[in-house]
Image (cartoon, rainbow, N blue to C red):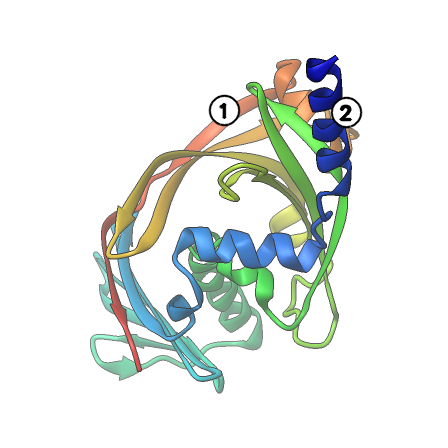
Amino acid sequence: MKTYYLLILLIIGVGCQKKLTVNEIIDKSVAAAGGDKVYNSVIEFDFRNKHYVAKYHHAKYELKRIFSDSTGNYIDILNNDGFTRRRNDTLKTLTDEWSGKYANSVNSVIYFFRIPFILKDAAVKPQLIGSGTINDQQYYKIRIDFSEEGGGEDYSDSFVYWINKGTFYVDYLAYSYSTSGGGKRFRVTINPRNIDGLRVVDYINYEPKDLKVNIEDYDQYYKEGGLEELSRIINKNVTIKYLP
């Protein structure tokens, strides 16, 4: 009889637990990955022979990509005022088309590095669409769409994030995009590590065998073997400096 009452109390307790809203889940994910202090910081890392610098400070941002090739030394800068490219310290004149392509390329690399912090951007429209299970772990499934205002040229892209119900880490994500011909991808986080309070991860990048499958179903599609490895996203030499 005692065991019966304990079981009843446990069921009642579970039933009375507060259900988290989508914004509360995002807040917990941000806290788990480093907290709000990351929004005022300078992060540097190397990716595929290019050096990236992401500075965010009180609504101002400056994103840099620094690299060299056979034609010279380049510095790409994307900030609140737009995009510029310098080659050998000389400002390059670019068409709107190429300026947009380069800006999108810089922003894309840093965007994925800053997950989950980008989930609190003003243009983000989050929606809790359910739960999922991958490798015996329980996940919140959050779909992200974007407002046209402030959402950039790729505001029509959509994302789904699988946020672990225990750790609140983003362990998986899927997205559909329209730039560069369009497509769909699924990413699995690997090599998680803590660098001065910042959770840093790399990714295995997958593409679907069948583009008709909805990205919201990629957790099941992944388990069924419907995704093929395309590339690995490895971030090296990561440093972070927090700003007041």
Residue 22 sits in quarter: bottom right
Q: Is residue 39 above or below residue 220?
A: below
Task: Please state which amino acid type lies under the numbered disc 2.
Answer: Ile
Instruction: Determine the residue positioned at 30% across, 77% down.
Output: 86
Front position in the image: 25 or 74: 25
Q: Where is residue 106 drawn, in percent x and y?
A: 43, 62
Mark 1 Cα shell of 10 Å, populated few (<14), some (14-19), many (≥20): few
Can the viewer see residue 51 in this picture? Answer: no
Residue 130 at least partly seen:
yes
- The outermost residue toward the bottom is 81
Frontmost of labels 1 and 2 is: 2
Q: Which residue is mark 2?
A: 8
Residue for point 60% across, 23% down: 134
Q: Are marks 1 and 2 in contact (CB under 8 Å)?
A: no
Give the residue at mark 1: 229
Q: Secondary structure at mark 2?
A: helix
Please give the name of the residue rendered at 47% of the width and 63% of the height, measured from the top-left corner.
107
* Residue at the (66%, 59%) spot, across then down: 23
- CA distance separating discs 1 and 2: 47 Å
Q: Earlier in the sequence, mark 1 or mark 2?
A: 2
Q: How far from the left and from the top, in percent, is residue 108? A: 49, 57
Secondary structure category for the residue under label 1: strand
Res. 11 mark: none
Near-viewer residue (87 or 177): 177
Label 1 amino acid? Glu
